[in-house]
Image (cartoon, rainbow, N blue to C red):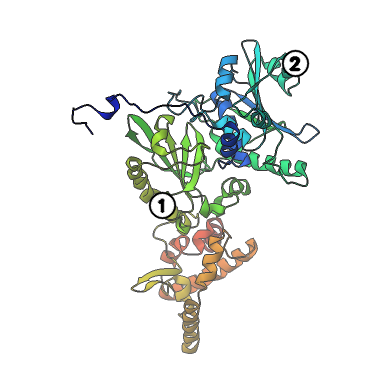
Amino acid sequence: MRTQGGVAPSEVASSVREKDLPPNAPALLGSLRAIGYSFHSAVADVIDNSVAAAASAIDLEFRVNNDLHVGVIDDGTGMSVETLELAMQHGGFGPERERQPDDLGRFGLGLKTASLSQCRRLTVVSLMGGVLSGAEWDLSRVKATGRWTLGLLDKGDLDQIPYVDRLRSWGHGTVVLWREFDRALGGEADPGDQLGKLLDMSREHLALVFHRYLKPEPGQRALEIRINGQEVKGVDPFLSTTSTQLPAQSIQVEAHQITFTPYVLPHRSRMSKRQLAEVDGEDGLRRTQGFYIYRNRRLITSGTWFRLMRQDELTKLARVRVDIPNALDHLWQIDVKKSTATPPMEVRAGLTQVLDRIGLTSRRVITHRGWKVREPLTRLWQRLETPTGVNYQINRDHPSVAASLSSSDPTERGAIARLLVALEMTIPFQEIYVDVASERDVAPDFAKDEVEEELREMLSAIIAAARALGDVRATLGRVQTLEPFNRYPETTKRLLAEVQDA
């Protein structure tokens, strides 16, 4: 918009009086405490600073004695006095500041907002170049002064801070100390017990969020996180060493690269108990499918298709790793907590291209339930699409069924045919769906010797029917492509060897 004289409004001298109006410190700090951090997401946000400081080891200390506190101690580069004060300033390193490619920070608020969302007293001590410095936000002090009053620690104060000796032994590093818990432990009858529960939740959360640091890819530096001395083991949501990895693809956005790497997990029947525990979590496979967004290898959000498709039962094994750089934070709408991200329109097209490929592969794995399929496979049940929906019928051409219907007694043949129709009419679709959707294994409950005996009886009946038709050799050649023989390849191979020996 231009004025009549052709001068932009911003260039016109203003007669409006101006006044600096800084925010009310106690009120704003109280509001920032309600930004929505959980305890474990707050811990993760503090650890981001340790990762950015090139730490190789991070210790979390949960203490429930007379000096109840949580400490985060790292062996990173540490901070000078000036850098520490800037780090303690709200917005000190703001979102417009150009960051290093591996920096996990964003708004210059995380350390303060995350910490004070859980406690009333945040103390940070850092050692760099032989100089130890410390600063403290105490909400009681801010309330008393009514100003943004940061406490600066002298030598006597620093000597009283836990874990400072650990920094001195390393020669560098930082201690972040949380004390005076009014939110994390507020109202708890047994604060120690509650802190123990929070410890367990934090361990699980950190194992997932930082798993690519705890189990680094080739060429990436490793990170060790310990909680009360016990190492946190990374949890790989993709089971990368055993899953099917589809070809990755990349797109360029504002001269920066975004990479999509699709994975399809093995069928549950092919996973060990340890693997199931690693990927199943509390929500189950169905609710953990989807895109996993990583910003500099740090997990931001997971288990969502961003409404590009539904979380379907047949796609529950599908996962897509999405790697984004911190230079595109403004497009992904990364929040202060670094726990949500929204893909921009120019990225959604790339996400959509991945879905068809990975969805098809996941459906195939679930449909075949993890068994290797020999083609052509003769199924016992046939899936038929009708104008009104989907129907399942027993395949009358399956050799086992055909053998049962080949009886010379018309009454017996009729009884078997009616039984097959009755089975088709009474398939418990709803019950099966509920069981499968709740991640329960739906499989025949036969002992190993029972399976072998049943297969032996089926094979005998098939051979008898084939002998009557003079087709024994051809029938034996395709037994391994028949259901249920294909599901027990070793047993079937052994039974066929017995027949050939006989």
What residue sits 49% from the left and 33% below the top? Answer: 297
Q: Position of residue 461 (x, y in %)?
A: 51, 73
Q: Is residue 390 left or right of residue 45?
A: left
Q: Is residue 496 left or right of residue 475?
A: right
Residue in front for this viewpoint, 23 or 117: 23
The mark found on residue 149 in the picture is none
Q: Earlier in the sequence, mark 1 or mark 2?
A: 2
Q: Between marks 1 and 2, how big is the CA–CA gap? A: 56 Å
Query: Can residue 61 be seen from the camera position used here?
Result: no
For residue 456, which quarter of the picture?
Answer: bottom right
What residue sits 19% from the left and 27% below the top? Answer: 6
Q: Position of residue 485 (x, y in %)?
A: 51, 62
Q: Is residue 18 left or right of residue 496?
A: left
For residue 15, which quarter of the picture?
Answer: top left
Crowdedness near tag 2: few (<14), some (14–19) or many (≥20) residues, C-alpha within 10 Å: few
Name the image quarter holding the C terminus: bottom right
The mark found on residue 156 in the picture is 2
Q: Residue most toward the left?
A: 5
Q: Is residue 302 left or right of residue 76?
A: left
What residue sits 55% from the left and 24% below the top? Answer: 89
Name the image quarter holding the N terminus: top left
Residue in front for this viewpoint, 114 or 16: 16
Disc 1 designates what residue? Answer: 307
What residue sits 37% from the left and 32% below the top? Answer: 257
Answer above or below: position of 158 versus 313: above
Answer above or below: position of 411 versus 54: below
- Label 2: element kind: helix
